[in-house]
Structure formats: structure tokens, C-alpha cells
Image (tube, helix red, strand yellow):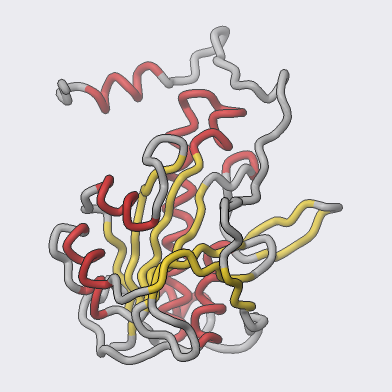
């Protein structure tokens, strides 16, 4: 495959130009579902309600935010996990039957899905989980000590094994393309960045270390979480642990 110029060509071809705006399928088809489903119903783990008052100020968290890569191999509580998940994509408001979330998304289409690699959380088996943001539950997809495999897939970044949990974010591309056509990829990465920054700030507020990962073998991570790499594919990762 010829890579030279791909990025420049993409940005050039997806520019909005007055008088020639592209259209997705929003005017002729139903909005894609925001609910991720699985062939075999996964085992569910209910998350405790997050604490949304008190604690350090936003300004304190912003001042404390750093990319920290060294963690003690110490467990998180389920409350810790719930707090971090809510900060990234938790429900903050209902508008009719629609649930708005803690991080912004272009068109409120929420194409980014959250998977968790659990290394050490009290009360949860180690393995791969999916976060159902609409119902505030974790869905166990694959059980096992998979931290070393994730670390190798992330170009030997062994903080993915040392961390208590690893966030793996994917994009369900069709949700965004439905409205934004090929420009959707721009918004998907913006959405992922918003989510990751919320995680950084929440981790800082809780006194945890956090570091995002953009370097990984895409298909190895896709295989780890069992997505096809086409309709749904990994876009970003982040480790969180006790320092």
C-alpha cells in the first residue's frame, strides 16, 4: 500500500467547501443504534453509582494532570472503575428517551465504544470487558490474564500489564458516517480525544496515574477484543493505575 500523501489527501478531500457540502445518509435512513450487542449474552457486572460532588476542583485536576507510566501493581476497587468510566462516557442528562454523556460527541452520535482490560480490580475477574454506557454495566467478554498480550500489542509498552486497568476505545464507524460521510473520521478522533482528556482529569482527581497509548498494532488489539477492524476498530488506548 502506498502511504505517502494519504493524510494530506484525506484532509483535502474532506474539507467543507461552500456550495458543495457532502451528505451522509441521515436524510434517507434511520439513525444507527447506539447499543452494542453481542451474539452470546455476556455476564454482567453492575457498576456502583459514581460520586459526582466534592473532591478536588477542576482546576486542581488540570494542574495535576500528567502522563504517568509507572504504576504499583495494586488493585482498584469497583468504585474506582465506576468513577473513571462515568467520567469518560457516563450518562449526565436525559432528554426524553435520549441519554447525554459526560464527554462531547459530534452530532451526539457517540461512535466510540469503551472496552476495559482488567488486570487488577477487586471483585472482578481479569479479562476483557465492554462498558455499556447506557445501562452503566460491565459486560465480561473474555476472561484471563491478558495484560502481557496487550503490552506486546502496544509495541512492548509494559505499563499495559502493570496498570490496574487499560481503556481500549474503538470506533463504530457507521454511526458517525451516517451523518458526516467520509468527514466522520475527523470527528471520531476528536471524540476519542475528548474522552481521553476526561479520563486524565478524573484519574488526576482520584490520585491515580494515567497515560494514553496511540502506538499499537491495530489488528492485534482488534483481535484481542474481538472486533473486525472494519465496521469497528481500535482508535486509542489508555492505562490507569496506582502510583
Residue occupying image coordinates x 35% and y 18%: 12
Closer to us: 71 or 138? 138
Residue at point 35% right, 53% down? 236
Quadrant of residue 64 within the rendered picture: bottom left
Residue 34 lies, in percent from the top left, at 65, 47
Question: Where does the image place residue 57, in percent across and percent down from the top left?
Answer: 53, 81
Towards the viewer: 88 or 146: 146
**Furthest residue in direction front, as rendered:** 40
Q: Is residue 91 above or below residue 47?
A: above
Expressed as whole percent of the image width and height from the top left, the position of residue 203 reads 42, 78
State left or right for residue 190 relative to residue 67: right
Farthest residue, direction right: 96
Q: Where is 151 relative to 108, above or below?
A: below
**Which part of the image, by quadrant, shows the C terminus?**
bottom left
Which quadrant would the N terminus be assigned to in this image?
top left
The vertical placement of 71 against 129, above or below, is below
- Residue at image location 54% in from the left, 33% down from the top: 174
In this rendering, would 240 be left or right of 156? right
- Residue 30 in the image: x percent, y percent? 73, 29
| Among the 4 quarters of the image, the one containing residue 238 | bottom left
Q: Is residue 194 left or right of residue 150?
A: right
Instruction: Indicate whether 192 appears above or below 71.
Output: above
The residue most toward the top is 19
The residue lying toward the viewer, choosing from 3 and 5, is 3
Question: Disc count in the image?
Answer: 0
- Residue under the image location 34 percent in, 49 percent down: 222
Amino acid at each position: 500500500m502506498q502511504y505517502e500523501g494519504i493524510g494530506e489527501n484525506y484532509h483535502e478531500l474532506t474539507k467543507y467547501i461552500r456550495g458543495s457540502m457532502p451528505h451522509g445518509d441521515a436524510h434517507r435512513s434511520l439513525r444507527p443504534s447506539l447499543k452494542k450487542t453481542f451474539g452470546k449474552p455476556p455476564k454482567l457486572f453492575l457498576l456502583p453509582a459514581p460520586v459526582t460532588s466534592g473532591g478536588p476542583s477542576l482546576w486542581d485536576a488540570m494542574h495535576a494532570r500528567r502522563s504517568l507510566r509507572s504504576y504499583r501493581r495494586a488493585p482498584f476497587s469497583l468504585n474506582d472503575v465506576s468513577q473513571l468510566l462515568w467520567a469518560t462516557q457516563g450518562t449526565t442528562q436525559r432528554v426524553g428517551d435520549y441519554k447525554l454523556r459526560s464527554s462531547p460527541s459530534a452530532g451526539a452520535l457517540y461512535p466510540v465504544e469503551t472496552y476495559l482490560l482488567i488486570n487488577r480490580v477487586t471483585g472482578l475477574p481479569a479479562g476483557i470487558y465492554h462498558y455499556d454506557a447506557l445501562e452503566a454495566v460491565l459486560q465480561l467478554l473474555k476472561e484471563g490474564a491478558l495484560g502481557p498480550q496487550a503490552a506486546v500489542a502496544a509495541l512492548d509498552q509494559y505499563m499495559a500489564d502493570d496498570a490496574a486497568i487499560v481503556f481500549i476505545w474503538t470506533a463504530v464507524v457507521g454511526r458517525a458516517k451516517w451523518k458526516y460521510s467520509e468527514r466522520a473520521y475527523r470527528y471520531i478522533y476528536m471524540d476519542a480525544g475528548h474522552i481521553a482528556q476526561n479520563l486524565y482529569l478524573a484519574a488526576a482527581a482520584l490520585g491515580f496515574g494515567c497515560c494514553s497509548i496511540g502506538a499499537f498494532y491495530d489488528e492485534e488489539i482488534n483481535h484481542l477484543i474481538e472486533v473486525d477492524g472494519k465496521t469497528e476498530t481500535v482508535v486509542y488506548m489508555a492505562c490507569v493505575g496506582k502510583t
